[in-house]
Amino acid sequence: MRRSGWKIAMALSLAAVLLFPLISGAQEKVIKIGALYPMTGRAGLYGLDSVAAMEMAIAEINAKGGAAGYKLDALYTDSKVKPDYAVHVAKRYIEEDKVNFLFGTVSSGVALAVTEVSKQYKKIFIGTDAAATELTVDNLQPYYFRVSNDTFQSMAAGALYLKGMQAKKPWKKIAFIGPDYAYGHSQWNELRYNLDKLGVKYEVVGEHWPKLAQPDYTPFITTILNQKPDILVAGFWGGDTVAFIKQALPYGLFDKMLYFHPDAGGNYELMSAMGDELPNGLILGARHYNNWPETEGNKAFVDDFHKHTGRYPSYCAEAAYEGIYAIAKAVEKVGNPDDTEALVKAFEGMKLKMPEDPDGFTSYIDPASHQIVQVQAIGVTEPNDKFPPAKKMLGQWKVFKAEDLMPPKDFIEAHTKK
Amino acid sequence: MDPQFLLIQATSGFTMAMILFLVASGLTLLFGVVNVFNFAHGSFYMIGAYLAYTCVSVLGFNFWASLVLAGLGAGVFGMLMESIFLRRIYGRAEEAGFQILLTYSFILIIDDLVKLVWGTEYKSISRPPGFSGAVELFGVLVPTYNLAIIALGLIVAVAAWLLLSRTRAGRIARATAIDREMLSTLGVNVPLTLTVVFGVATALGGLAGALAAPLRSVTPGAGIEVIIDSLIVVVLGGMGNFWGAFLGAIILGEVNAFAVAFVADWASLFSFIVMIVVLIFKPQGLFSPAKVRKA
């Protein structure tokens, strides 16, 4: 008995060894995507939502036979939000796993490091979130493409919003609070650049730079109240928005000034975390909204995501989803995932009908900056319980034309001269 | 300069200080009193915040009862960690180094456990009923919930001081920092003492996390963010003294409050400058009681 069992095991393993090349041979036509997202710590939410959206898109495309006969396959690694570690993983993806595309990143610090690897190895890197304008301006390289908007676009929309408001309800004094690193500083610089360009007159009464993940904002809140701005511009990231709003509420800050947070304030996780506590009348923006535009495409995306994960997506999921479609589209056009230069040409100018596109507009990748050109909307918090656990969502939308939001020549020149 | 604004900032600083003190109190108890360094202290703060979230938002318990449950839960978890893992490295030649490595690894483990149990979405709980507004004291607006935190901070400070200096249990706990061998020769169950002190310290951490939850967003990784400030508080105050940590927290809170108001561009640097200056002139911290120092 024992001997025959052993023989069967031998035979089976021999068969497996012999059959293996056949099995893998059958699956040879694969587009390999090496994804880097944070999966732990406070950015983990964004990484896991992005991965879930990628998997959705991959399953959809593969179910329809893949792209140009190739199936999509992705590898996922925790970036740990550490640029040096992410560089190590990106190189491993290219050298050992032989990926065709690098994909992802939430943190701009990580993206700025990985884009250098992409440049060095001539491997296309699809950026789905990291919002630093530098990626498509100062540090642009031929193999980087971004399918989500950058801070410049949010701030250009923000400046147009503020200008429109000034005509109706005059405001003059403005203060800023945002994290003390590149993300916070570029938001504030880009907003002022756009306000100045639009000829808006304003007076800055305060600039505040808490550290990222500052636990306690009390001294900032009392200082801002003392400066009495008409508008408080916020550039917080992630859960910091929740902490600031919760701590400012008992001081009545939101009755005394307008809270204006155009880049990441309108993220769904803020609504879901705060429920009823979120005040009405905050003016917020995000890269994707679960309730705008009310198109079939957006509804289908949001509902599918909810069906897959049991939760509504944060803003970052949509670009991760669409980034996969962009890859499929490029490979479809070129016919294979290996001709990098032809793929670059395919991405340049590519039109992508994204969930966030309102009817009558299709996002496209600007051939010069490799940056996706998109409509931006900014909304105001109001009661809405259609996306539980959120009790408030954005509404009263103002929508800004895509072409008005791209960095103009003089901005790009000033940033690329160095 | 408007004197009213100075008073407002001073109050902000004090409010900030009380939360700092509460978060740091467990670390002070361990690091300062029994000389065990728990790098994962912030993770117990995080566990407390998540437990409070479950009790309040999922199970619908009363907020104040949830605070107690969150503290107890964190304490039980702390005792398990101490008795299963930390106990094995006591008395080793490089005990301090092992403590840092082992407790640091628990930061990562607890972060992942939290992610498995509660997911990565931001959680948040509302302030308890009756504590969502603010009152005016001498013309200064103070949120009522912050007043509750100040009261609790004072209670913890006084209770810990009484317990440590006026009771036999407190004296035994302090003695473990000096000579564990002698203590056990005298018939004290040293391992049990350390486990209990560890439980109390992690319970304090959990309580602080639960208390801070209505003011912050509860996320994985929240623990690592409070550990540095807590360390500054403990080091500023000097080892082995709760009042030292109390004073350290007030200094840190006030320095922050006025730095934010007057040197906005450099505000986050100032807490470190203060720590460096204190350590240059008083390397043992502000309150370093000679009798508790090791010979």
Image: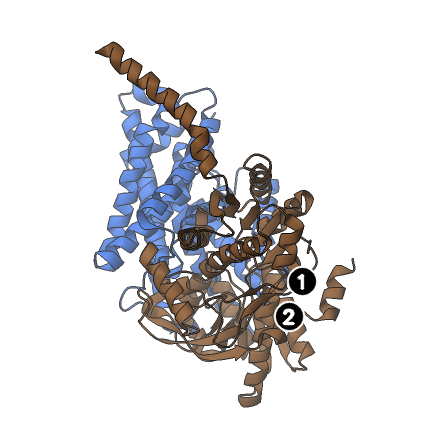
Question: What is the chain identity of the residue bearing mark 1?
Answer: A
State left or right for residue A365 relative to residue A71.
right
Estimate the x, y position of residue A172 in percent, counting from the top left: 60, 82
Question: What is the chain identity of the residue bearing mark 2?
Answer: A
Q: Is residue A19 above or below residue A340?
A: above
Can you identify the residue that label 1 sits on? Answer: A369
Whether residue B288 is visible, yes or no, is yes
Closest to the observer: A103 or A268?
A103
Eye-nearest disc, 1 or 2: 1
Please report the residue visible at 32 percent of the width from the left and 38 percent of the height from the top.
B78
Q: Is residue A46 above or below residue A233?
A: above
* SS for dot 2: loop
Chain appearing in brown on the rendered image: A
Please report the residue visible at 66 percent of the width from the left and 80 percent of the height from the top.
A198
Q: Is residue A388 above or below residue B45?
A: below
Please report the residue visible at 64 percent of the width from the left and 65 percent of the height from the top.
A366
Chain appearing in blue on the rendered image: B
Q: How is the image coloured?
A: by chain
Estimate the x, y position of residue A354 in percent, counting from the top left: 49, 66
* SS for dot 1: loop
Can you identify the residue that label 2 sits on? Answer: A406
State left or right for residue B127 relative to residue A151.
left
Estimate the x, y position of residue A151 in percent, counting from the top left: 59, 65
Whether labels 1 and 2 share one chain: yes
Closest to the observer: A300 or B112?
A300
Q: Do residues under tags 1 and 2 come within 8 Å of each other at their CB atoms? A: yes
